[in-house]
Image (cartoon, coloured by chain):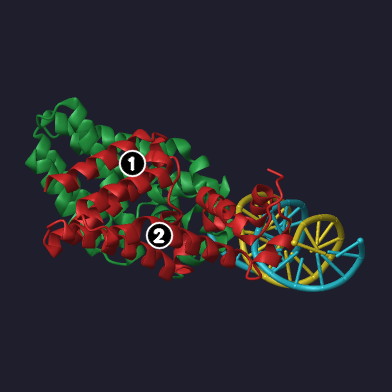
Chain colours: A green, B red, C yellow, D cyan
DNA sequence: GTCTATAAAGCGATAGAC
DNA sequence: GTCTATCGCTTTATAGAC
């Protein structure tokens, strides 16, 4: 992986992969230089705040992606159930059917939680809120919508944990299918 | 926390708390000495293999607890649904209604996954297998039992992630209640 | 069995040459 | 903008006094 990355923007997805694989603490600068092909000089030129800034940028990038591809479609699409189905498709694609875990989930369980409390909280809160809103538009009463939204988001995260632990992406695929059915049924 | 711990056995639960709070990488020896009140000399006297041995002992201890209080009751109790209810009660108590996260889950998402693949895999596989067995005894066909068992174990892990991320144990409590209903219904 | 001192290695971060 | 060399600190682990 000696490819030269043109600018700061191109580095972010690679940084995300490193944090995804190793967590915040485990993502050493040497691992980052290895994966990005950039020396420390370049990295600190792009991110003067060092590793903390790299993680913040990654979290912001993820938040932006979900905002654009998941949360806002959930909020905007008039047909609530159609919005939910689009969310499942985007989610399945994003997590590569369970092969990729969620960086925010990794941070939430790890030691980085205390450093990035706000971003971690904001990501999951926004997801639950957007999904609950779509379910209300689909006819659920607000309490049920809130509970079901929590169920789906937690179910996805749990499926990622279990898929990785068992090294079986089938868990993720089955979970997504089941959650789809749950929301469609009632 | 300057209490002197009598022997190796007494240290293990404290070690578990440190790994639970900080993950494997984040659990530095200085954090461990602070929480246990034991100097490095004592720690290496108890665990010659260092931090890796401490983590292995903690994982084995957790595995033993779940085997005794969750997996074996699930396998032995004749009435499958009664066994499942006992599991939920033990689980809720163990995770302090969502205030404690799962060390094995933390390891599964973090960098320690590669060091403890077998233990992480074994824990979740045993849980799913025991629960699926109880559900078969309760009348489910094997395929449905397997899927539902995955659903419950993943649901619990996901609820722990979300509870910690949102700093709201209500998510865990509601999830456990909902999973109970799911298994009771069909 | 527990402590302090210390070794060796890796960490994040910085400085300066180019 | 990118590299190499290096700083200061923390890490895990060990050695030796008590």
Q: Quadrant of the C terminus of chain A?
A: top left
Image quarter of the N terminus of chain A: bottom left
In the rendered image, is residue B147 in sight? yes
Q: In terms of depth relative to the viewer, which is nearer, C15 or A131? A: A131
Marks 2 and 1: which is nearer the front?
Answer: 2
Write down the residue under mark 1: A64
Q: Could you tell me residue B76's position as x and y percent? A: 28, 61
Q: Position of residue B178 (x, y in %)?
A: 23, 40
Q: Residue at x 15, y 26 (%)?
A: A141
Q: Is residue A152 above or below residue B118?
A: above
Q: Residue at x 14, y 63 (%)?
A: B143
Horizontal relation, residue A41 to residue B184: left or right:
right
Which of the chains bears the disc numbered 2? B
Query: Which residue is under mark 2?
Result: B68
Mark 1 Cα within 10 Å, few/some/many (few <14, many 20+)? some
Residue drawn at x 37%, y 48% is B90
Q: Residues within 10 Å of mark 2 (few under 14, many from 20)?
A: few
Q: Secondary structure at mark 1?
A: helix
Q: Whole-Å distance between the Cαs marked 2 and 1?
A: 45 Å
Foreground: D10 or B140?
B140
The chain ID associated with circle 1 is A
């Amino acid at each position: 992986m000696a490819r030269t990355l043109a600018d700061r923007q191109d580095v972010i997805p690679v940084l995300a992969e490193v944090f995804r694989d190793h967590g915040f603490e485990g993502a050493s600068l040497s691992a980052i230089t290895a994966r990005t092909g950039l020396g420390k000089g370049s990295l600190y030129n792009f991110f003067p705040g060092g590793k903390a800034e790299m993680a913040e940028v990654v979290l912001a990038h993820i938040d932006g992606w979900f905002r654009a591809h998941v949360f806002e479609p959930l909020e905007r699409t008039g047909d609530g159930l159609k919005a939910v189905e689009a969310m499942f498709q985007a989610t399945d694609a994003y997590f590569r059917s369970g092969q990729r875990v969620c960086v925010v989930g990794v941070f939430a369980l790890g030691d980085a939680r205390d450093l990035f409390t706000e971003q971690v909280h904001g990501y999951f809160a926004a997801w639950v809120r957007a999904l609950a809103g779509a379910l209300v538009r689909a006819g659920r009463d607000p309490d049920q919508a809130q509970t079901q939204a929590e169920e789906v988001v937690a179910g996805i995260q749990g499926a990622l944990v279990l898929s990785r632990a068992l090294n079986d992406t089938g868990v993720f695929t089955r979970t997504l299918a089941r959650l789809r059915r749950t929301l469609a049924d009632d």
